[in-house]
Image (cartoon, helix red, strand yellow):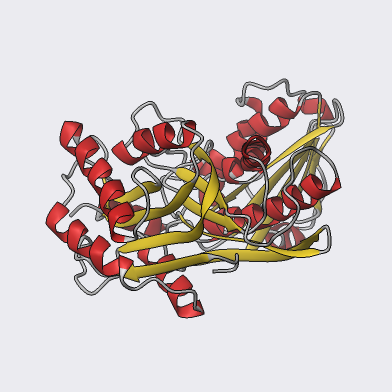
Amino acid sequence: MAAKGFRCSAVGAGIKVRKDALDLGMLLSDLPATAAAMFTTNRVQAAPVRLDRELVATGRKLRGVVVNAGNANACTGVKGTRDAAAMVALAAACTGSPKDTFLVASTGIIGRPMPMAKVTAGIKDAAGRLGRSKEHAQGFERAIMTTDLAPKSAAVEFLIGGRKVRLGGSCKGSGMIAPNMATMLAFLTTDCAISAPLLRKALREVVGTTFNCVTVDGDCSTNDSVLLLANGAAGNRPIRSAGSAYNAFRAALLHVSEELAKAIARDGEGATRFVEVRVIGARREADALRVARSIASSPLVKCAINGGDPNWGRIICAAGYSGAEVKPSKLQLRINGVLLFKGGMPTRVAPEKLHACMKPKEILIHLDLAQGNRRGRIWTCDFSREYVNINADYHT
């Protein structure tokens, strides 16, 4: 783990269909840690989300997280609630931690009861394998994956008051990804000493411009969670007010969260292209984001990107039905720097140049509304045939 004073582990508990796959991870802080969290906006919420909300709201110091993949523990009734609570209690007991000092996260298929015999054995096994090595961290990253093709992590080192501070994180997410957050689990750790109110403030602000700005398919999940633990092991003077120290911490959190959010978009199910939709010239930031989300979520736009088809009319169309104020005569649209639309009509672009702007693996859609100075951006990916195959066969 990047941050000082944290250990992690991963085991194969047999929760996933593939019996040899890692599917249960544990994260432990050697010191009691201040916690902050944000969760799905879906009104149908998995048992771990409901339980974590309650635990974080108490304001107590926490010790760690136990997480499983392969089963979402969502729409599982009273049994699911009891199972989530049992995972928290067992993780705490197995690590010698006080009661109710662990958070729990689950991801996978909705509606199946947790295989608690396997989960119980897995938690006991994971507690005995905790370590700080690169291999331990890589195992944890793999254990939280479902349809992800690659593990996702990021870390940064910075100074506060002359003290070296570290902040890092790992996440999973590939499909059922949409603002605000989705089938995404993100675990962030730092050895910075910072007050609970400022930790919550920083996470809330950063999530709004990173994890909440990713969409793969427009579906919002029952399980998404961003969990942040700060244990103070760096020994810096605790950050208790806004100022240069807080700004340095927030910048580090923003950097790590942005890298993780982009990694989710790049690893979208079946994705072949990474796309950033950047909207400027809006009267309000909310309008800029509304237009960007509309474009990024359009199946027609995403299919055109997959095929390298310069069908920019779909982008203008998506902007028009976004619900934000859009004036076609003022719009300026560029794709990878090539101006395609201005003054209510297409520009004169040579066919070869038009097609060339859609060929790169990274696509920048830049739309100027020309109405103000507010802006917004959304990260997404294309829709491919593989996306349909993955989700058609996911359960069966």
Give x and y (percent) for residue 258: 65, 53
Quadrant occupied by the N terminus: bottom right
**Horizontal relation, residue 353 to residue 394: left or right:** right
Residue occupying the point 40% across, 31% down: 54
Residue occupying the point 16% across, 37% down: 79
Quadrant occupied by the C terminus: bottom left
Specify the farthest residue to the left. 117
Residue occupying the point 83% across, 57% down: 161
Q: Is residue 307 among the parts visible in the rendering?
A: no
**Horizontal relation, residue 246 to residue 296: left or right:** right
Give x and y (percent) for residue 159: 79, 62
**Horizontal relation, residue 349 to residue 355: left or right:** right
Q: Is residue 16 among the parts visible in the rendering?
A: yes
Q: Is residue 246 above or below residue 171?
A: above
**Horizontal relation, residue 54 to residue 277: left or right:** left
Q: Nearer the viewer, residue 50 or 90?
A: 90
Q: Nearer the viewer, residue 171 or 203?
A: 203
Label tally:
0
Give x and y (percent) for residue 324: 68, 22
Give x and y (percent) for residue 170: 52, 60
